[in-house]
Image (cartoon, coloured by chain):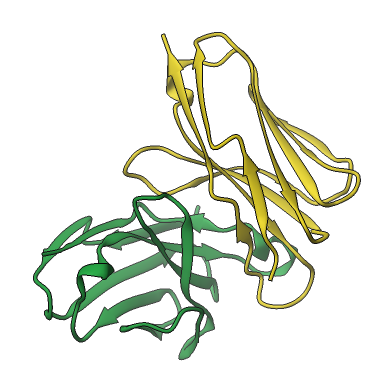
């Protein structure tokens, strides 16, 4: 099955810094999704990408669907303490049962 | 708008006891429904998914089972819990068409087996 490599595993940054994380796959995906999970809660969908090369923003968050269709990037600008959490990428291939493959997550800690 | 509910929020159960976790979705019809488990290591493990009433697909063989008695109700069960069943259980739904890839998660149930 498909495998997603999400990096970095953890990030410790100062408030105000920009953040960048990515996911790479051994397979071609036609959908990339980015989620954020706050401690003790369910993941929340941040951004969905459906076209290679697509660049989509949601506030201070920007995500890109890689041209090769095997990777995706999430950037957070001017981080704030409430950005703390685990960020997951997920990718899906066409057809089948609509089951995305999830990365193992990037844990983000923002120091005030 | 659509909402998803899970209960209970937390549960402490002894080894060998039965389990029933419930998930309901409001504001949509014929959703795809999913059960995930998240261990302390934070990865999301898909346990079951359902594309319709009475249709259940199992991803991982274990002592858990799932049922979908109604269109917007998804239940996770066990006859006898194991210590290894402890974890954070998440229910999710997705809609029709190409947006079926977009899953929306519930608040989760924290299960501790003692």
Residue A42 position, x and y percent, is 41, 49
Q: Position of residue B96 (x, y in %)?
A: 66, 69
Q: For this rendering, which residue is in front, B53 or A80?
A: A80
Percent position of residue B32, x then y: 55, 73
Q: Colour of chain B?
A: green
Chain seen in yellow: A
Tally of numbered tags: 0
B22 left or right of A76? left
Quadrant of the rendered structure where residue A96 is? bottom right
Please tell me which residue is depicted at 59% across the width and 51% down the height of the picture.
Answer: A103
Q: Is residue B99 above or below residue A79?
A: below
Instruction: Give the answer, above or below, for where A10 lies relative to B48.
Output: above
Q: Is B84 on the left or on the right of B96, as rendered? A: left
Q: Where on the picture, by quarter, is residue A18?
A: top right
Q: Quadrant of the C terminus of chain B?
A: bottom left
B34 versus A106 height, above or below:
below
Instruction: Write the residue at 49% across / 72% down.
Output: B33
Residue, far bottom? B54
Q: What residue do we see at 47% from left, 54% from top?
A: B43
Residue B93 place in picture, x, y as percent = 51, 64
The front one of B33 and B78 is B78
- Relative to A60, is B66 above or below? below
Q: Residue at x 47, y 58 (%)?
A: B44
Out of B59 and B82, give the one closest to the viewer.
B82
């Amino acid at each position: 099955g498909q495998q997603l490599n999400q990096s970095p595993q953890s990030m410790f940054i100062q408030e105000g810094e920009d953040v960048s994380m990515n996911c790479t796959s051994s397979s071609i995906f036609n959908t990339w999704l980015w989620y954020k999970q706050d401690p003790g809660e369910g993941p929340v969908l941040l951004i969905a990408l459906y076209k290679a090369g697509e660049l989509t923003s949601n506030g201070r968050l920007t995500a890109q669907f890689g041209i090769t269709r095997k990777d995706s990037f999430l950037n957070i600008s001017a981080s704030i303490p409430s950005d703390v959490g685990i960020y997951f990428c997920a990718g899906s291939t066409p057809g089948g049962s609509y089951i995305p493959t999830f990365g193992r997550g990037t844990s983000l800690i923002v120091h005030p | 708008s659509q909402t998803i509910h899970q209960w209970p929020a937390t549960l402490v159960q002894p080894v060998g006891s039965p389990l029933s976790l419930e998930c309901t979705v409001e504001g949509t019809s014929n959703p795809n429904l999913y059960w995930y488990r998240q261990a302390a290591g934070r990865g999301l493990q898909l346990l079951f998914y359902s594309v319709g009433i009475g249709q259940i697909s199992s991803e991982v063989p274990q002592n858990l089972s799932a049922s979908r008695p109604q269109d917007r109700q998804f239940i996770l069960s066990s006859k006898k819990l194991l210590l290894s069943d402890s974890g954070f259980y998440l229910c999710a739904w997705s809609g029709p068409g190409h947006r079926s890839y977009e899953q929306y998660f519930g608040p989760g149930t924290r299960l501790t087996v003692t």
